[in-house]
Image (cartoon, rainbow, N blue to C red):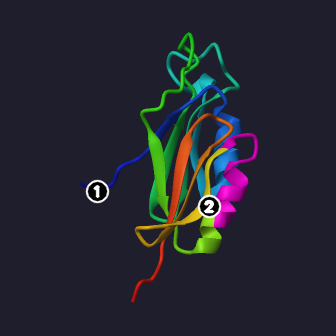
Amino acid sequence: MKQIIPYFTMDRCEEAISFYQTVFGGEIRHKSYGKDVPGFEGFPDKLIHAELHIDQNLIFFFNDLQLKEMTHGNTLIIGLECDTKEELLRYMEILQIGGRVEMEVANMFWGATHAKVEDKFGYMWELNYTHDLA
């Protein structure tokens, strides 16, 4: 398998991709607006699909305006293994803006610093930094 790519479906795609770029950095590529996407011509200025490239990672965003209602469930949690505790703290600080902290930053029994936060779009993030146990 080459890569697993998270695909966020939401109705605030333009806002979300800018927010996540603020959180994680990276480069926004491949923006497609309704005027260029078959079936979405009625939404010419809405961002329908975009990609956020972060180092070797990739996140897709899709604005499915044809859905009647979007419901966030509790079946998906996005886990991030951070390079440093400082990186974890930075992500936590930004992701909680407009969202809610599910679990405060804490040292865990498995040798990691860990936290859990739901962002303003309703997505749950588990942030982890595994300590160097050498």
Residue position marked by numbered label 1 in the rendering? 2
* Mark pair 1, 2: CA separation: 32 Å
Q: Position of residue 47 (x, y in %)?
A: 64, 31
Residue position marked by numbered label 2 in the rendering? 105
In the image, the segment drawn in magenta is 89-100
Residue 11's image quarter?
A: top right
Q: Secondary structure at mark 2?
A: strand
Q: Position of residue 128 (x, y in %)?
A: 50, 63
Nearer to me, 9 or 28: 9
Q: Amino acid at mark 1?
A: Lys
Say if the magenta span includes residue 96. Answer: yes
Residue visible at 63% across and 13% down in the picture:
42
Q: Position of residue 37 (x, y in %)?
A: 53, 25
Residue visible at 64% across and 44% down in the picture:
17
Q: Amino acid at mark 2?
A: Val
Q: Earlier in the sequence, mark 1 or mark 2?
A: 1
Looking at the image, residue 81 lies above or below residue 74: below
Q: Position of residue 59 (x, y in %)?
A: 50, 48
Nearer to me, 89 or 24: 89
Nearest-to-viewer mark from 1 and 2:
2
Mark 2 Cα-neighbour bin, 10 Å: few <14, some 14–19, many ≥20 = some
Looking at the image, residue 75 lies above or below residue 3: above
Mark 1 Cα-neighbour bin, 10 Å: few <14, some 14–19, many ≥20 = few
Hey, which residue is sitting farthest top in the picture? 68
Q: Is residue 103 left or right of residue 45?
A: left
Q: Is residue 98 left or right of residue 86?
A: right
Residue 121's image quarter?
A: top right
Nearer to me, 28 or 79: 79
| Rendered-image quadrant of the N terminus | bottom left
Residue visible at 52% across and 73% down in the picture:
83
Hey, which residue is sitting farthest front in the picture? 109
